[in-house]
């Protein structure tokens, strides 16, 4: 299902992560804040804000939240990949890596990450075309020192020449991981068509672009880049902590005012694109994934500064609508497309950006691509003529206002990162509200962008495995061919549409009533209703009772997918067709501040969430859709999507594939891809219909209501659900996924050749005793282990970009895992390095002092005990318990109690009983990439090799 108003750049995501009513309306409050020059925040946000400019021209935003358990900071520099010297492409990114490796005051290369681990912290950074952004969060007590360490990055980094080669390899590994991602290949090709425009360059950096050349040496150039661009006057800082603003201001002055101000002009790009060479093209692109896509990609001028007039959002809203008569609705109804999304990224190329219409095609649609493009172009003409209407403005404004009025807090880390990013793009006082602030209906601004949606600025992408091609990308895996779009075809876009296209009708689901139920104090979720074979639990929010929102989980539980591969596939097909058929409803709901979601697992779960006012209407329609109306054609198309989806999993990052394979192995009811494909191919539409009818008639039906509901509301939900069900129903016992039963001496090994270059390993040693005590020990130890692994295997040896350790729960058991994705070692060699590391780490653990351990444990507890920041945080642990039938709803409390008891001797014992215990049950997942085909897998002593997961599940002992 799709989401409108996708605000942040897609690219960033890929590259890298209360008081209620106060008697003043949101508008009045905004007006008052505006007058006072304050940061414009949600009426639901009771944190204190302040902005200031330090004497060195560095602009700072302070956010004081007395309830915060963690403090956070982000610093963005207004320089990025567009400023790389062409002789060292990727350098801004490489420099970002180097800053973490020590400063004058804190010269140790691993000192920063060790400090963060010891203090419950997290740290990261990203580099993009026009920005480099660094961020961390840490326990409140460690904030001052964390800021001291962090701010020294920007005053006196060591930039050790001896780490040049090492960190270059880390950057290379990062590129290697993304080389097979189609997004990056297409983005690269898109930029390569831009001639002499600065966007036409390689972004991430690798061993080919970074390094010493005749007249360009990497290290001195990096130092020069830092000296030139890292100037206080183009930096923005966002700080969040539990301290009062006054004290935060002192911290800001103390740590950031001594960053040097070089008074530079903020770098930017002004070069003009030559549209006569860029536009009017069709790009045939052969991707790695088996997809059938069509994209209308318009290059528009960067209009970020018009955030208050929102022309891109207005246009995307109309073009992406699924209301009756729109292209999305009609083309879907004709079986030509399965998805149509519109998004705008106005700064995708610096001073230019893109507005793009992305379409997923069916096979029938593949045969009708020219017609689909013409339909969309004709619809754009209709929008130009009749669509610039203030009624749509009112609808979008209402939607955004509602979101903003009840805006929830999020994680501190992400929050400061977003603020420091936004402060580079919009005035600081708009850094919070810019995505939601729709000040006025500005027809001229909308017309201005519409006027850019022309054939001259259009590139049409045909993306599929079958495309003709005559060229290959250099830095990415992708083949392509570029052709002119004929004048004749362009002519057809001007003709009157063959389909009767209409502009969207009004949204019927926008909430009108934000009343909240009277607060009800409750210790835990209670079973409040058992009637007509339906059980319903209720838990009104204890932390956010003033939010007029809630989540309804309606779970049709059945054991069929555990037992039968057919049921597993049918469930997936049902899920696919439901999403397709209900996406108009889901989109309408989304604009109204509600979400509709279906999840296939041990049965089918329907989730309705968001503002509660119109949930009854939404629920009724969502339930009615469960029975589907699938004909033979749409069923065949769903199978095609399902099969390609399965096969495309083989193109994912190897370490994702490894974790997925691990999860399939230890849980019953999973199958090999070929078995699923064969099953899907043999199924018929009638079988799906029969399966849906059976699942709706025979199940265990459970409902979980969390948020703005009372018992009467739950009774209504139950009645609505009951009405939507078949008259004849029978109740089945509740069924849960069964897990592998670990036994001493068992070693399961899964070895697979995969379709991507790198190698990935997941190596898990399970503790033989199922208990919270062991889970607690693993929980305390994992960040320390992970940190040492990162330092040794990445920073020092440069074996990988992604490496670490983690705890893996197998129901009541816990495993301790080590994982890596490496572009430099084969499977057996990497396993040998793992085995050696396990011994090396034992020595590090032996040397861990009581004091350092106490700090580690205290930090773990701070993290575990953090109060929820929003509804999602509050319900998360409860709903997990609910699905697992842990009706005391105290798993988190039990874990906290167990962590309180953990001693240094305990974690040492745990480590010896898992990682160093030859008898500990073990699971090893080995993914061998194409680059290492000629090197062996790692056979382990006493191993059971699993070659067929389904056959293994047949005979495995289950918990
Ligand atoms: Zn990086």
Image (cartoon, rainbow, N blue to C red):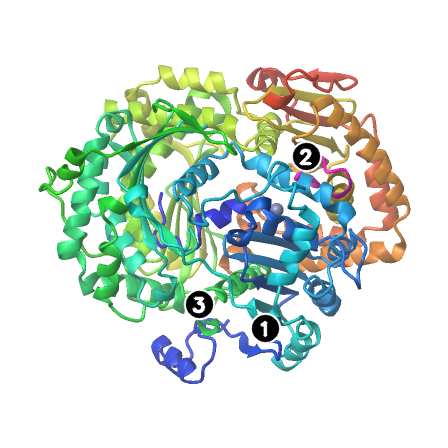
Instruction: Write down the residue under mark 3.
Output: 426
Is tag 1's residue or tag 3's residue first in the polypeptide sequence?
1
Q: Within 8 Å of ligand 1, the CB of disc 2?
A: no
Task: Give the side of residue 544 with respect to residue 571, left or right.
Answer: right
- Image location (x, y in percent) of residue 117: 74, 54
Q: Which residues are magenta?
A: 795-806
- Image location (x, y in percent) of residue 543: 53, 65
Residues at circles 1 and 2 in contact by the CB criterion of under 8 Å? no
Instruction: Write down the residue under mark 2.
Output: 820
At 51% from the left edge and 75% from the top edge, which residue is drawn? 46
Q: What is the C-alpha distance between the residues marked 1 and 2?
A: 39 Å
- Image location (x, y in percent) of residue 123: 66, 55
When the figure is inspected, residue 160 is found, relative to residue 955, above or below; the finding is below
Residue 58: image tag: 1
Is tag 1's residue or tag 2's residue first in the polypeptide sequence?
1
Magenta-span inclusion, residue 796: yes
């Amino acid at each position: 299902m799709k989401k409108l108003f996708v605000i942040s750049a897609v690219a960033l995501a890929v590259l890298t992560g209360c008081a209620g009513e106060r008697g003043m309306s949101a508008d009045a409050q905004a007006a008052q804040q505006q007058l006072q020059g304050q940061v414009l925040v949600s009426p639901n946000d009771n944190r204190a804000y302040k902005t200031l400019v330090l004497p060195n021209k560095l602009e700072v935003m302070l956010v004081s939240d007395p309830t915060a358990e963690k403090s956070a900071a982000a610093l963005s520099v207004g320089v990025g990949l567009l400023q790389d010297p062409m002789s060292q492409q990727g350098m801004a990114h490489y420099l970002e890596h180097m800053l973490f490796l020590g400063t004058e005051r804190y010269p140790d290369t691993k000192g920063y990450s060790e400090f963060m681990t010891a203090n419950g912290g997290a740290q990261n950074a990203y580099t993009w075309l026009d920005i480099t952004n660094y961020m961390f969060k840490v326990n409140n007590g460690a904030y001052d020192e964390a800021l001291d360490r962090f701010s020294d990055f920007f005053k006196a980094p060591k930039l050790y020449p001896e780490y040049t080669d090492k960190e270059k390899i880390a950057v290379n590994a990062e590129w290697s991981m993304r080389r097979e991602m189609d997004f990056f290949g297409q983005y690269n090709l898109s930029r390569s068509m831009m001639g002499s425009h600065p966007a036409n360059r390689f972004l991430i950096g690798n061993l080919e672009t970074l390094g010493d050349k005749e007249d360009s040496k990497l290290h001195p150039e990096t130092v020069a880049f830092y000296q030139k661009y890292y100037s206080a006057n183009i930096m923005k800082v966002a700080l969040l902590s539990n301290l009062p603003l006054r004290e935060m201001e002192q911290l800001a002055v103390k740590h950031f005012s001594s960053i040097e101000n070089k008074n530079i002009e903020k770098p930017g790009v002004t070069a003009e694109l030559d549209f006569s060479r860029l536009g009017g093209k069709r790009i045939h692109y052969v991707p790695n994934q088996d997809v059938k896509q069509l994209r209308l990609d318009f290059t528009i001028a960067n209009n970020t500064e018009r955030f208050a007039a929102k022309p891109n959002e207005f246009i995307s809203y109309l073009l992406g609508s699924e209301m009756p008569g729109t292209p999305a609705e009609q083309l879907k109804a004709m079986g030509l497309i399965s998805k149509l999304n519109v998004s705008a990224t106005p700064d995708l190329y610096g001073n230019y950006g893109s507005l793009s219409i992305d379409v997923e095609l069916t096979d029938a649609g593949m045969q009708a691509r020219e017609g689909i493009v013409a339909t969309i172009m004709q619809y754009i003409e209709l929008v130009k003529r009749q669509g610039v209407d203030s009624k749509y403005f009112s609808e979008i404004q209402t939607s955004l206002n509602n979101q903003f009025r009840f805006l929830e807090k999020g994680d501190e880390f992400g929050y400061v990162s977003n603020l420091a990013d936004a402060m580079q793009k919009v005035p600081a006082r708009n850094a919070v509200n810019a995505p939601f602030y729709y000040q006025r209906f500005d027809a001229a601004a909308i017309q201005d962008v519409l006027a850019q949606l022309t054939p001259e600025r259009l590139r049409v992408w045909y993306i599929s495995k079958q495309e003709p091609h005559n060229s290959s990308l250099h830095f990415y895996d992708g083949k392509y061919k570029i052709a002119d779009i004929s004048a004749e075809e362009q002519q057809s876009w001007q003709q009157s549409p063959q389909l009767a296209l209409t502009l969207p009708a009004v949204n019927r689901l926008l909430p009108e009533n934000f009343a909240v139920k009277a607060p009800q104090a409750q210790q835990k979720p209670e079973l409040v209703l058992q009637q007509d074979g339906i059980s319903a639990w209720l838990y009104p929010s204890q932390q956010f009772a003033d939010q007029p929102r809630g989540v309804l989980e309606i779970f049709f539980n059945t054991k069929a997918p555990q037992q039968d591969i057919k049921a597993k596939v049918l469930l997936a097909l049902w899920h696919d067709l439901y999403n397709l058929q209900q996406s108009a409803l889901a989109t309408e709901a989304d604009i109204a501040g509600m979400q509709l979601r279906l999840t296939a697992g041990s049965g089918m779960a329907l989730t309705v969430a968001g503002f509660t006012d119109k949930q009854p209407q939404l629920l009724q329609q969502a339930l009615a859709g469960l029975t589907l109306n699938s004909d033979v054609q749409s069923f065949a198309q769903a199978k095609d999507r399902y099969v390609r989806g399965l096969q495309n999993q083989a193109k994912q990052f190897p370490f994702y594939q490894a974790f997925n394979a691990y999860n399939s192995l230890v849980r019953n009811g999973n199958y090999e891809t070929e078995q699923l494909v064969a099953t899907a191919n043999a199924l018929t539409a009638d079988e799906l219909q029969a399966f849906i009818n059976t699942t709706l008639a025979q199940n265990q039906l459970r409902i979980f209501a969390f948020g703005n509901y009372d018992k009467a509301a739950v009774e209504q939900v139950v009645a609505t659900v009951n009405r939507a069900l078949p008259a004849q129903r029978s109740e089945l016992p509740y069924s849960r996924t069964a897990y592998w039963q670990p036994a001493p001496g068992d070693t399961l090994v899964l070895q697979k050749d995969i379709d991507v270059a790198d190698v990935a390993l997941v190596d898990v040693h399970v503790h033989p005793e199922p208990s919270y005590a062991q889970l607690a020990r693993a929980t305390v130890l994992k960040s320390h282990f992970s940190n040492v692994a990162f330092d040794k295997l990445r920073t020092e040896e440069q074996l990988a970009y992604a490496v670490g350790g983690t705890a893996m729960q197998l129901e009541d058991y816990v495993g301790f895992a080590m994982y890596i994705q490496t572009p430099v070692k084969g499977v057996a060699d990497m396993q040998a390095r793992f085995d050696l590391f396990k011994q090396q780490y034992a020595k590090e653990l032996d040397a861990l002092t009581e004091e350092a351990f106490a700090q580690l444990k205290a930090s773990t507890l701070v993290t575990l005990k953090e109060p929820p920041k929003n509804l999602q945080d509050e319900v998360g642990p409860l709903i997990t318990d609910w699905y697992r039938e842990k009706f005391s709803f105290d798993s988190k409390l039990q874990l906290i109690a167990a962590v309180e008891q953990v001693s240094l001797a305990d974690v040492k014992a745990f480590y010896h009983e898992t990682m160093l215990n030859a008898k500990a049950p073990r699971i090893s997942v080995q993914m061998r990439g194409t680059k290492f085909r000629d090197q062996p897998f790692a056979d382990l002593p006493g191993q059971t090799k699993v070659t067929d997961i389904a056959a293994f599940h047949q005979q495995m002992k289950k918990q």
